Amino acid sequence: MNINSELYAETAEFTTIDNRTLVKNFGDLPEEYKALREGSTIYDCGSYGLYSVKGENADAFLERLATKDIGFLNIGSITECYFLNEEANLVASVFILRREDDFIILATWEHADKALKWLQEKAPEYEVEVEDLSGSHGVLAIEGCKSWKVVKELFSVEIENIALHTMQVVDLEERPVTVIRVGRTSEYGYTIISDVETSGKIYKAFLAMKDNEEKEFPMRECGLDCLEIAMLEIRQPNFLRETKRFGNLMELGQQWFIRYDKEEYIGFEKVREILEAGVEKSTVGFICDAEDEAVLEPGLEVFIRNIEVEVVVEDEEDNDDSFFADDGEAAEPVSEEQVQEQTQEQAEEPYIPNEQVEPEKIGEVVYSLYSAKVGKVIGVAVIDQPYAQSGFQMLARRKDGRDVSVNTFSAPIVRPLSWDQKME
């Protein structure tokens, strides 16, 4: 159970991931989602893995494990990367923070135990010390387009000085608190690390702000359900659901946290082999035509009628990962009406193949969720090339044999307000 669980609202519903308990939701998912998109949420990351790595060889040790360069990481900077095994299968997705005397490794629920086991297994060769801080520290996340205002008020900081992927140590009642600007939803996000007692005080302070009738925007406690919907809407990788059962990292579009020009990390040779071989399938987002909340289960077959497909080669600039990391730098504001119009155009003007041709199986559903913002079920499918493109109408076949019409789309299907709102 998370260390702040006694502070949760009574409506909290729980789930378990790899023997770690976390909140699924707080009983009102629409209000949680509204707060995330229009205000601020807090979610307790006490079930995350929090580890310290120290020693003379700590740099070399993490350089060997991480898929991004560690040697160029400045004190106070964070990188998001992978630990891979020799077959380039994902061990863990982690944040690595360089501090003056050690490195902090932060691993989410689904990878927490795996990350610790991997660190401990590899540590003896480099004579480094790996310490589990999870029991002595609390981790909170404050996310939402107005979360910067909350963090600014909680800690009396110059919020603009905390740049993306950097941290600042502040004092709260003479206790050190590490504020890191990273998140998981592409809204403004901050991860807060402190001792257990201080973590509880921060959670209480957020709840007090939430209950203030004069607050300027919605604030809520938030659970996993809300996070997953927001991540899916902008196609942030969901490692709980997008697993190797559906393909390798490249096929699943999870290559964002790999530096291709870096060598000498575990799994590099296999990564290079996969890159040279190319991929025969890729993931693509889809939206269901039907306006109901019935999700499509993982593994359902996806079909398209036999047609000639023009291969679309996306411009390299449009295919980078900047929109995952840049949570507030868009130059041209986009209104909610424009987002809705774009979403409606994608749904109403798909490519419709010849109805007379027998359908051909081209992939399977990875997962799907109902998005109240879109008003329909959206999801991810892994599709054979060259069909893994936006703008196609496909059929997903339910277990009872019924076909459901789905249309592929380009992410994001919901544009985070944080991309168009500046900090004041």
Image: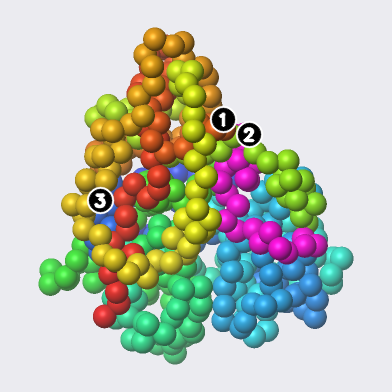
Question: Which residue is rendered at x = 24% and y = 39% of the image?
Answer: 344
Q: Position of residue 211 (x, y in %)?
A: 19, 66
Q: Amino acid at mark 1?
A: Asp
What is the C-alpha distance between the residues marked 1 and 3?
A: 29 Å
Q: Which mark is residue 280?
A: 2
Residue located farthest toward the left when viewing the structure as drawn: 214
Residue numbers of the magenta segment: 243-265
Label 2, label 3: how many angstroms apart (C-alpha)?
Answer: 32 Å
Q: Nearer the viewer, residue 144 or 204?
A: 144
Magenta: main secondary structure: loop
Q: Which residue is mark 1?
A: 384
Q: Residue 381: where, in percent of width, then height?
A: 48, 34
Name the residue rendered at 79%, 72% in the picture: 60
Which part of the image, by quadrant, shows the C terminus? bottom left
Residue 57 is covered by the magenta coloring: no
Image coords of residue 423 (percent x, y)? 30, 77
The mark found on residue 339 in the picture is 3
Residue 250, magenta (yes or no):
yes
From the viewer's side, name the closer residue of 116 and 403: 403
Q: Is residue 370 above or below residue 1?
A: above
